[in-house]
Amino acid sequence: MPEQSITPTYDVENAVLSRYQAGAQTHEPSLCCPTEYQDVHYLDVIPDEILTKDYGCGDPTRYAIPGDTVLDLGCGAGKNCYMVVQKVGPTGKVIGVDFNDVMLNLARKYQGAIATKISFQNTKFVKGKIQDLRLPLDLLQAWLQAHPITTLEDIARYETEGDRLRAESPLIADESIDLVISNCVLNLVKPSDKQQLFQEIHRVLKKGGRAVISDIICDEPPTEKILNDPELWSGCIAGAFLEAEFLQMFEAAGFSSVEILNYGAEPWQTIDGIEFRSMTVRAYKGKKAIGRERHQAVIYKGPWKQIQDDAGRTYFRGERMAVCDQTFQRLTNPDGPYAGQFIPVAPYQAIPLETAAPFNCHPEARRDPQETKGADYQLTQLTEDDACCRTESCC
């Protein structure tokens, strides 16, 4: 996987924190690119103080659905959270995570007022690092105030307390989230923490959950000059992902069905000949379960002659390909990433899932029609109403 070989010579976290603390006080247009939101009416309940001090480069909010538990990484002043909460409704839940106290205070300031406008309250804003979603920083800060660090031994006790909190009081629990969103924040994480960041996103998602991330990508690696400019890092430039690297980071963390939802037609900025633009990606956390044989098949419609999925299975255009029940459900789900690409072929006699045998997975297994119909299928049926099929004058 491509990685930035140059390590910045300054403290990335402090550079980002300082810039965004200032951005919470005074609007900084350079911190975001122009963004069009699909559901603009959701902005009506959000105060101008939040709208003018919230930054992003895309619209991941449109992919939330009623009942979702949503986690917003780097929630800032809370604009995306307050948009999403209206989509998930009273049966859903929205959690915003940020490291910036100034931004968090601004987000929390209007919780009651917005809850009154929409008639329910299910937003929560917590302090944390998005690359370490187990660590509850407010609890650790309280411990630190009671146990100030003055010796090397104190540092060891501090680290032990952090490990204890991660294990006993995680900020975001394993497999507790339906949808993770983020709007132009992942690029702000220092390079050494980015692999852990994607692993954390995967950890907190439920099986079958998805991540929709809008961020800045570049077509060439940033130069040493760009990487060593704190203003360009906190301005969402120096930490930008390479185009292919961004998708590879999801795949390396265990995600599947990774797809580009939006790709900026024009660069947001061009520096030293390198183009920086917005891209929105969606990725799913697969359901790790034993595949079951229910004599199902799918037919890939085309237009490609053949395609291959993340597990290495090949689907040939127009052919019945044997799949397990789990794959069948994923490929034919009308709300899934492959909607409309496959024709489902269900067995004539359903095999109960609880009695189905394990699926013998083969990357290019065809499904014989007799398997779908059953070995004893001997039906002969003519359609009397179709005169065309019963006369020689049809064609």
Image (spheres, rainbow, N blue to C red):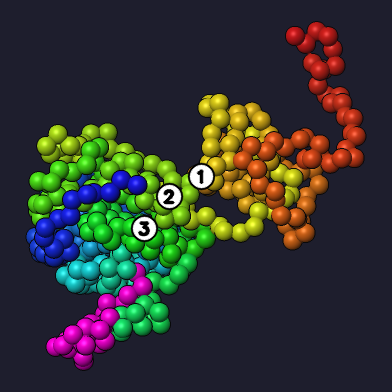
**Residue 211 falls inside the magenta stretch:** no
**The residue under label 3 is which amino acid type?**
Phe
Lower sequence index among marks 2 and 1: 2
**The residue under label 1 is which amino acid type?**
Asp
270 to 358, vertically: above or below? above
In this figure, which residue is indicated by the disc labeled 1?
A: 310
Predominant secondary structure in magenta? helix
Judged from the image, the secondary structure of the residue bearing numbered disc 2 is: helix
Is residue 277 something one can see in this rendering? Answer: no
260 to 83, vertically: above or below? above
Q: Are marks 2 and 3 in contact (CB under 8 Å)?
A: no
User: Which residue appears at 16% of the width and 60% of the height?
Assistant: 12
Q: CA distance from mark 2 to mark 1?
A: 9 Å
Q: Are marks 3 and 1 in contact (CB under 8 Å)?
A: no
In this figure, which residue is indicated by the disc labeled 2?
A: 251
**The residue under label 2 is which amino acid type?**
Glu
Q: Quadrant of the C terminus?
A: top right
Q: Quadrant of residue 305?
A: top right
User: Percent position (x, y) of residue 376?
Assistant: 90, 40
Residues drawn in magenta? 133-159
User: Which of 260/125 is in front?
Assistant: 260
**Residue 151 falls inside the magenta stretch:** yes
Q: Are marks 2 and 1 in contact (CB under 8 Å)?
A: yes
Judged from the image, the secondary structure of the residue bearing numbered disc 1 is: loop
User: Percent position (x, y) of residue 288?
Assistant: 57, 58
In this figure, which residue is indicated by the disc labeled 3?
A: 198
